[in-house]
Amino acid sequence: MLTGDRLTEFQTRYWRRQACVFRNAVDISAYPIGIKDVCELALSELVESRMINPDYELFLGPFERSDESDGFLPENHLLLVQCLEQHLDAAASLLSDQFHFIPTWQVDDVMATVGGTGATCGAHFDQYDVFLLQHQGNKRWQLDDGGHIESDLDDNQEVRLLKGFKKTQTYDLAPGDVLYVPPGVGHFGICDGLSLTLSIGIRNPTPAELLGDLSEFMIEGLAENRPMNHQLYGADSGLPAAVADELFGEVSRLFSPATLQRWYGCYVTRLREPELLCPDDTREYTKGMNLLAALPSRMSYARVDQTFYLFVNGDAFYLTDDDEAWVVTLCRTRKLPTDCHPSSEGIDCLQSLLYAGAVV
């Protein structure tokens, strides 16, 4: 969707700055995702889904088939279904083909919204970047100038509704159009006829989320939980500045750049729904196997100090330089090259991934 000069312009002019629209950006026919497919997913206990009625009341899935009308939705209701890329091949292909300019570890998910004329989830804002791809039907989007924070939301509503939304821009989207909306920008989408929109969200965790997860990672990984070696600072009951220096030294020793990078690789590849994987401890890895990443799997890689890592679904695998080529290909294409020659560490890694159902 975005390559070359067009991608450069987007990064320098629009990313995290202002909204923009790309007309006829995606050939929808290459990614056959039907409204019926989305509604079927909303019936499953393994899929996160919710529905919003015209009064902005929120209903959580899974839904029963009797909740549907003519195979779709009650009139004026909006259905939202998360993580399509973990369930539908077409959604996974859409990500790899059209949004290849976004690292896979940075993509949150592909969410579908389905509704008939007038259906909406109201004016709201997100704390992350989002690309809104119109897949079927038409939809009108109204945007404001942005800069919103959590206190701008209406506390009396079940859904995230903005107080005092004032539109400054309007975009009418047809199939194949993509609207980019930065974090904090209010947007209000209204279906015009039966509509299917795919929202590609970009991960943007808060400092509180990061610190909470990092703390758990560090505590679990402590080889020795020894107490601090406090100096004796004298009889004065006051806290000298040297105490802060000592504390900073202890924390710095634990939170090295290498440790942070290893933790973040695990963090960004962790699955929302690990039960979607199908473990199989009967399969044995042999060289030349035709292996694909399972749809739910999240993968990345990094060189930390002198060690090469593969991160898969929240786990870190220690590999060698000989494994770098096939790891990079697997992460980028989600296919293991059949002519690769993994090291002994790589073979153990691939065997573990087979057992876990991370590759199939």
Image: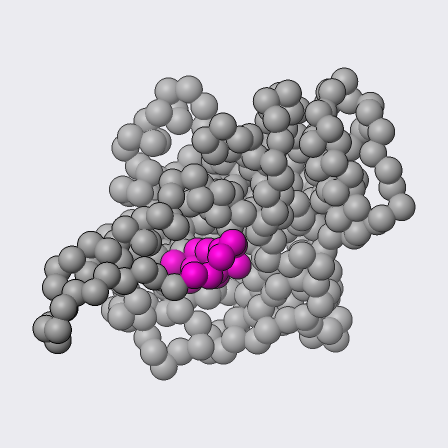
Give 161 or 170, whichever is nearer the viewer: 161
Magenta-colored stretch includes residue 118: no
For residue 39, above or below residue 261: below
Place residue 289 in its image quadrant. top right
For residue 218, above or below residue 290: below
Place residue 298 in its image quadrant. top right
The quarter of the image holding the C terminus is top right
Tell me how the rendering is colored: one colour
Count of numbered tags:
0
Q: Residue at x 61, y 65 (%)?
A: 49
Percent x, y of residue 166: 25, 61
Place residue 70 in its image quadrant. bottom right
Q: Is residue 294 left or right of residue 229?
A: right
Q: Which residue is drawn at 40% across and 69% down?
A: 160
Residue 82 in sight from this viewpoint: yes
Q: Which residue is most to the bottom?
A: 156
Write down the region rendered in magenta: 211-226
Residue 97 in sight from this viewpoint: no
Percent x, y of residue 8: 35, 25
Q: Is residue 205 left or right of residue 342?
A: left
Give 7 or 323, whichever is nearer the viewer: 323
Q: Which secondary structure type mostly characterizes the magenta part of the structure?
A: helix
Q: Which residue is most to the right?
A: 282
Give 358 or 6, whichever is nearer the viewer: 358
Q: Residue at x 31, y 37 (%)?
A: 14
Magenta-colored stretch includes residue 221: yes
Q: Is residue 248 left or right of residue 260?
A: left
Q: Which residue is drawn at 33% across and 54% down?
A: 251
For residue 14, above or below residue 341: below
Percent x, y of residue 180: 40, 43
Give 318 or 313, whichever is nearer the viewer: 318
Percent x, y of residue 269: 56, 46
